[in-house]
Image (cartoon, grey):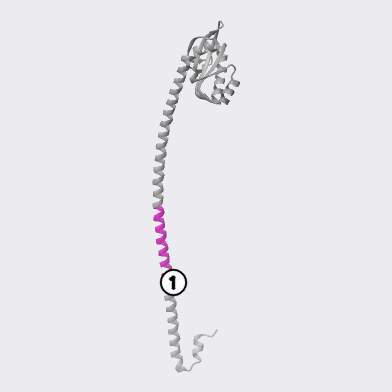
Amino acid sequence: MISYNEIIEEFPKDFQLPMLKIVDRLREEALDTVRKSDFQELKMVVSSLGTSMEGLAEAQKRTEQRVGELAEAQRKTEETVREMAKKQGKMSKELGGLTNSFGYVLENEAIRFLPGILKRDEGIDIQIMDRRYIVYDDGHDDELNIYGEGVLEGKKVYVVGESKAQLGRKDVDRFNKLLKRVSEHLREKLYPVIVTHSAHPEVESYAKDKIKDLEIYKSYELK
């Protein structure tokens, strides 16, 4: 490739020096133009980068603020849940106490009126009717809601009863297991009795199929 100097040497000597000056000037201007162009491009890049950084900083600020808001919302939610749990526990305790109260009322009614009913229906002469703990030989015990001792045709018999506001299948199953334990311990004739406010006909049928000689009395039948 022919250089600028070789080309200039082809000119007459009087023109060579001016041509060199012109070429040098053009080279300087070209370099200056390139430097200015690069600088402008660099300025644009820096400006764009600065704008991006500002955007990122603002986004980070909004994110941090949102995180603080979420943390506060979570704190309030947890506090609300704790308050609800306390109220639920209090309500459950009150409901349990109310249920126990109804249960004791039903038991008291049963203990009061069953002796006359059993005398009328079964001919049993009741001598004792109350609540009772049965303590077994192994030290375990069962609490009987309704416990009675009586005489039928000259023989001692026991009445073992359960009172439930609303009778369910699980209640029947538990009572049946209880009767088996008590029967093995007392070794005398048992008269099983259930007193309830209400029971579905299917549950009543299930209970009588499950427990031999079972008598079911509704609360309104006690008086």
Q: Nearer the viewer, residue 159 or 80?
A: 159
Residue 144 seen: no
| Count of all numbered marks drawn on residues in the image | 1
* Foreground residue among 223 and 184: 223
Name the residue rendered at 44%, 23% in the picture: 102
Label 1 environment density (alpha carbons within 10 Å; few <14, some 14–19, many ≥20): few
Residue lying furthest right? 209
Horizontal side, residue 21 vs residue 204: left or right: left
Q: Is residue 211 above or below residue 87?
A: above
Residue 55 drawn in magenta:
yes
Q: Is residue 1 above or below residue 123?
A: below
Q: Position of residue 170 (x, y in %)?
A: 55, 25
Horizontal side, residue 9 vs residue 67: left or right: right
Residue at coordinates 46% horizontally, 20% vertically from top-left? 106
- Determine the secondary structure under disc 1: helix
Q: What percent of the width, then of the height, locates residue 217?
A: 52, 19
Can residue 156 be seen from the camera position used here? yes
The correct choice, above or below, for 29 with respect to 177 in the image is: below
Residue 22 screen position, x and y as percent: 44, 87
Callout 1 amino acid: Glu
Front-lying residue, 124 or 9: 124
Q: For this rendering, which residue is in front, 79 or 106? A: 106
Identify the residue at the far top of this view. Answer: 154
Q: Is residue 157 left or right of residue 82?
A: right
**What's drawn in magenta, residue-wise?**
42-64
Give the quadrant of residue 182. Answer: top right
Q: Is residue 120 left or right of residue 54?
A: right
Magenta stretch, main secondary structure, is helix
Q: Which residue is mark 1?
A: 41
Q: Position of residue 96 (x, y in %)?
A: 44, 27
Magenta residue check for 215: no
What is the quadrant of the N terminus in the image?
A: bottom right
